[in-house]
């Protein structure tokens, strides 16, 4: 007998059994069983029939009896009291640090030590691979870290805390895992000045004094920070990072909150370049185009950098100026995305959005020497506009904010969403001959570009995938 537990939409929990005489079920956060439930609905359907589960904000139990193929399946649903309960929320709080001169020097040394451990471990793994040896695990690398701290040549690693060095090896192990799972490219060596950071994973070593706007870190002592908001929950870990010459601290916390009830109805979103987001109810958000706004200042700063002698004092000043412009561009884009995603998630219970592959959409059209591309310059401008919008970051923010507010995000396959008529489901390339107007050749339906978001929201005859 094979048993498998399945959860549907976060509200259904059932146990599947291959035996025709045995079946069990459990109820989500409830002690009631399906046998004691007074309300029960039985649905008989064939085994190969497509089943749809409509997720309501109530607790329910699925009791499934699967008989030998190809006989029928009995699906019983028992309803519990109205939806309520607690949920765990992981949230990060980021603040700017105000260290003194000695603390700044120490943090740069700690970040450099973590970078050295990461690069040394990566070089060792590549050497073992070329020699035909097995890759070392995280535990094996930690044993070597102890030897590195004891060697005379690398004894300066003792000046840095042990846990951040171990976390650098943990990051290396995760990079290899993502590579083997085909989620990322092969790990690369880290470079000084790019993503300098170190992490404290043990909350027992961290002390947070919000009343005096300070926190205590091992081998750094008490540090001041800009206390712009209250940290809620229990501290789990802490990350210190360097961005554009400023040190920041990210505090991850965990707390239990009441599971909220969603507000509003369903809405579809069409992402674009001329309009950042067009909702199916007619609302649209204009694009910010943060990179385009700072393009002139960035070009002049880069031209000034090209005239400086490499690694001179003026060269470093010009490089710092470019970094500040890039930081301003990123901050403005993130601020706009946070405001837009918050407004949408707080007013809608279900949001449908296209599952756009931004990396494929923004590929270069240059081609190769044998097969050169066409309209390369125009495609390069389109790619720059697509990447300036931040579509993937917008989708990521929508996913967790909707989960916090009790809603859900549905990903719709983008195939033919720009050609499907929302009235008669006619799919044709002639339906939308221009970017500004849609006219169906079958029923004559005409609409502004909001039709695309409306078609995305309906998703007729199209499988959808909820984002967990």
Image (cartoon, helix red, strand yellow):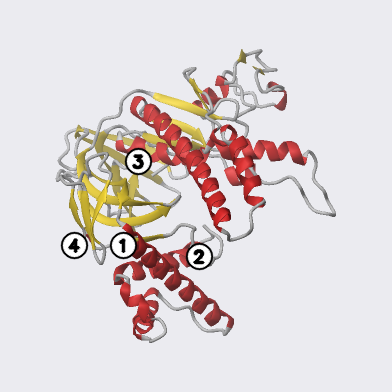
Q: Tell me the tag on residue 204.
A: 4
Q: Residue at x 32, y 71 (%)?
A: 160
- Nearer the camera: disc 2 or disc 3: 2
Tag on residue 102? 1
Q: Nearer the viewer, mark 3 or mark 1?
A: 1
Which residue is situated farthest in the bottom direction here? Answer: 152
Quadrant in which the N terminus appears: bottom left
Relative to 436, is 342 above or below?
Answer: below
Residue 300 seen from this side: yes
| 46 up-or-down from 421: above or below | below
Residue carrying label 2: 190
Residue topped by disc 3: 9
Q: Position of residue 147 (x, y in %)?
A: 36, 84
Name the side, left or right, on which 68 lies relative to 423: left
Measured as percent of width and height from the top left, residue 36 is found at 15, 41
Residue 50 seen in the current view? no
C-alpha distance separating marks 2 and 3 = 40 Å
How many numbered discs, if any?
4
CA distance for labels 3 and 4: 36 Å
Can you tell which quarter of the image residue 109 is in?
bottom left
445 in relation to 297, above or below: above
- How far is the residue under mark 1 from the one under mark 2? 25 Å
Dot 2 falls on a residue whose secondary structure is loop
| Residue 204 figure quarter | bottom left
Q: Are marks 3 and 1 in contact (CB under 8 Å)?
A: no
For marks 3 and 1, give the CA distance.
52 Å
Tell me where residue 231 appears, x and y as whole percent. 22, 44
Quadrant in which the C terminus is drawn:
top left
Q: Name which quarter of the figure residue 99 lies in.
A: bottom left
Q: Which of the two discs, 4 and 2, labels the residue nearer the N terminus?
A: 2
Decide which of tag 4 and tag 1 comes sooner along the chain: 1
């Amino acid at each position: 007998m094979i048993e498998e537990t399945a959860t549907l939409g976060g509200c259904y929990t059932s146990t599947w059994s291959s035996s025709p005489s045995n079946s069990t079920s459990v109820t989500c956060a409830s002690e009631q069983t399906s046998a004691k439930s007074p309300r029960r609905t039985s649905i008989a359907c064939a085994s190969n029939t497509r089943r749809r589960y409509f997720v309501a904000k109530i607790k329910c139990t699925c009791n499934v009896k699967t008989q030998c193929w190809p006989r029928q399946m009995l699906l019983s649903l028992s309803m519990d009291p109205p939806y309520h309960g607690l949920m765990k929320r992981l949230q990060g709080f980021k603040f700017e640090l105000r260290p003194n001169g000695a603390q700044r020097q120490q943090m740069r040394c700690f970040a450099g030590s973590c970078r050295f451990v990461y690069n040394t471990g990566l070089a060792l793994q590549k050497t073992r691979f070329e020699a035909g040896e097995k890759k070392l695990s995280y535990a094996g690398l930690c044993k070597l870290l102890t030897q590195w701290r004891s060697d005379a040549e690398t004894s300066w690693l003792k000046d840095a805390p042990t846990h951040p060095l171990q976390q650098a090896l943990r990051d290396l192990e995760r990079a290899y895992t993502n590579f083997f799972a085909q989620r990322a490219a092969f790990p690369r060596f880290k470079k000084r000045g790019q993503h300098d950071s170190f992490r404290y994973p043990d909350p027992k070593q961290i002390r947070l004094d919000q009343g005096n706007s300070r926190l205590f870190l091992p081998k750094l002592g008490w540090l001041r920070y800009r206390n712009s908001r209250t940290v809620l929950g229990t501290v789990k870990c802490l990350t210190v990072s360097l961005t554009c010459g400023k040190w920041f601290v990210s505090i991850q916390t965990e707390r239990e909150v009441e599971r909220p009830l969603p507000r509003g109805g369903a809405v579809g979103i069409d992402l674009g370049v001329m309009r950042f987001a067009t909702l199916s109810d007619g609302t649209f958000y204009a694009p910010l185009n943060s990179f385009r706004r700072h393009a002139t200042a960035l070009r002049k700063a880069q031209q000034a950098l090209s005239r400086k002698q490499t690694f001179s004092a003026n060269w470093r000043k010009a490089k710092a100026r470019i970094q500040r412009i890039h930081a301003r561009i990123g901050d403005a884009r993130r601020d706009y995305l946070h405001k837009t995603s918050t407004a949408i998630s707080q007013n809608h219970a279900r949001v449908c959005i296209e599952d756009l592959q931004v990396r494929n959409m923004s590929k270069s059209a240059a081609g190769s020497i044998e097969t050169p591309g066409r309209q390369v310059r125009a495609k390069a401008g389109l790619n720059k506009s697509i990447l300036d919008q931040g579509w993937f970051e917008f989708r990521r923010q929508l996913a967790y904010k909707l989960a916090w507010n009790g809603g859900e995000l549905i990903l719709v396959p983008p195939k033919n969403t720009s050609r499907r008529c929302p009235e008669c489901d006619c799919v044709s390339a002639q339906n939308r001959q221009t970017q500004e107007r849609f006219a169906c050749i079958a029923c004559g339906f005409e609409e502004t570009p909001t039709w695309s978001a409306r078609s995305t929201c309906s998703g007729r005859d199209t499988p959808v995938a909820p984002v967990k």
